[in-house]
Image (cartoon, helix red, strand yellow):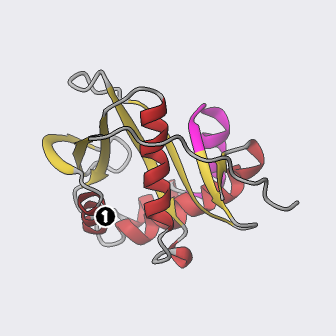
Amino acid sequence: MIRPMTNADIPRIAEIHIFGQRQAYKNHVPDDILFGKMTVAKRIQYFDSNAFEGYVYDTGIIKAFTTMGPCQDADKPHSFELLRIFVDPFMQGQGIGQKMADHFEQRAAMKGYTDLCIWALECNTSAAAFYEKLGYQKDGARKISGYFNVPEIRFSRRLTCTTSAPQPHPTPPA
């Protein structure tokens, strides 16, 4: 069910990303950003022009995606970062986010990382609760989101044991 992201997935990923952000950030980010600056078409261009290690949760319908890579924070040069994790708002509450987070940790372990981090908008209390449920803790790092111009906080954790390699996933039906 979890497989590498492909170019053909980008329109659906962009849709999940935009609608997920609109749901999570309403009342915290101005509407002119959520509904003006942020569009599916602009996200398609963004994902199409950037290289990410990304994965989708696909059951014939892409329900979620993640992107990940080495952390770019100067104080975390040996950390692996979960750059994005979004579950379609209509698909939440099915354990998909947990599976995607587990997959991220498996990828980190396969690459030899033991330190993990995730940034979240400070106003996104549901994301914070989810990350804390996964064992991540606020580590005191803060910054202002360049895109939304609101505070972000970083969550970190260490892998405490070797995570087994992810099992191959069947190819979804055509």
Magenta stretch, main secondary structure class: helix
Q: Amino acid at mark 1?
A: Phe
- Residue lying furthest right: 174
Picture coordinates of residue 167 (x, y %)?
Answer: 61, 47
Q: Nearer the viewer, residue 161 or 39?
A: 161
Q: Residues within 10 Å of mark 1 (few under 14, many from 20)?
A: some
Image quarter (top left, top right, bottom left or bottom right) of the N terminus: bottom right
Above or below, 163 relative to 111: below
Picture coordinates of residue 138 (x, y %)?
Answer: 16, 49
Give the residue pinned by disc 1: 130
Residue 40 colored in magenta in the image: yes
The residue sitting at 24% across, 51% down in the picture is 136
**Would you identify the image quadrant in which residue 174 lies?**
bottom right
Q: Nearer the viewer, residue 145 or 6?
A: 6
Instruction: Determine if residue 135 is in view.
Output: yes
Instruction: Determine if residue 40 is in view.
Output: no
Picture coordinates of residue 77 (x, y %)?
Answer: 29, 21
The residue sitting at 28% across, 27% down in the picture is 73
The residue sitting at 42% across, 44% down in the picture is 105
Above or below, 138 relative to 81: below
Residue 42 colored in magenta in the image: yes
Dot 1 lies on which element?
helix
Picture coordinates of residue 15 (x, y %)?
Answer: 62, 62
The residue sitting at 32% across, 45% down in the picture is 118
Number of numbered discs overlaid on the protein picture: 1
| Highlighted range, magenta | 39-54
Q: Nearer the viewer, residue 109 or 53?
A: 109
